Amino acid sequence: MAQNSLTLGYLLNRSAVQYLTLDERKALVNQVSPEIRQKRVADFMRPNPAVIHETDSVRLALKTFKQTAASMLPVVNEDQMCKGWLRLEFVFDLLHQGKVGAKSAVHELLIVPFISVKADELVDQVLLRFAQTADRQFAVENGEGQLIGTLALLDLVLADEPINDSSAPELVAQ
């Protein structure tokens, strides 16, 4: 069942991560150098992310996904407070099942809960939080709870990599 339903599979994976041992959680943290772990979220967050408003239509949300080439985007209310994440595959699941249409409002969709962090938090502490959840991206909020950026686990794991990594495969123009 989990393989045939992205939603169910996601929720099962999300809950399974809670049962990792401390050593398993530390394995993720240890993927990042001590120097990076002592920096702040602000050093790695992506400021002013593309967002979807909960009152937007599904059609407008799909356009935003296309423009950003993202598979997951934050959903905000009129006060820029994060309501959660909208996953593109969930939108297509609901469209395919006929549960929503292009004119439906985003708030009618499955909006996945989010974890928030503050820009001044240490990366070390945030990595431990990443290790306790299946989430791979956190919402960065200001003191008033407004979304000001996102933090991707991928950016933290690759932070030690040089920008011009000679071991990376080259793209060949055709």
Image (cartoon, grey):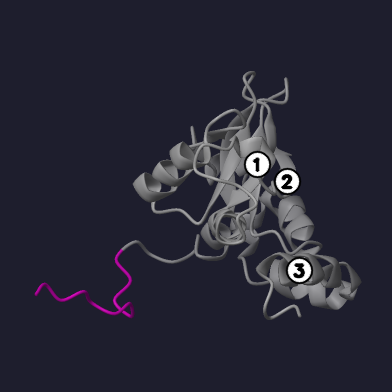
Mark in front: 1 vs 2: 2
Q: What is the number of the mark on residue 114?
A: 2
Dots 1, 2 in contact, CB < 8 A: yes
Circle 3: residue type: Leu
Give how far apart the Cα atoms at labels 2 and 3 are.
Answer: 17 Å
User: The C terminus appears in which quarter of the rendering?
Assistant: bottom left
Question: Could you give the CA–CA distance between mark 1 and mark 2, rounded to whole angstroms?
Answer: 7 Å
Q: Secondary structure at mark 2?
A: loop
Indicate the quadrant where residue 3 lies: bottom right
Tell me the SS state at disc 3: helix
Q: Residue at x 54, y 58 (%)?
A: 92
Of the 4 image quadrants, the one containing the N terminus is bottom right
Residue 70 horizontal side relative to residue 27, left or right? left
Distance between mark 1 and mark 3 Cα atoms: 23 Å
Q: Is residue 95 visible?
A: yes
Label 2 environment density (alpha carbons within 10 Å; few <14, some 14–19, many ≥20): some
Which mark is first along the chain, 3 or 1?
3
Residue 164, position as x, y percentages in the image: 29, 66
Residue at numbered disc 1: 139
The label number, if any, that marks residue 163 in the structure image: none
Most foreground residue, 147 or 131: 147
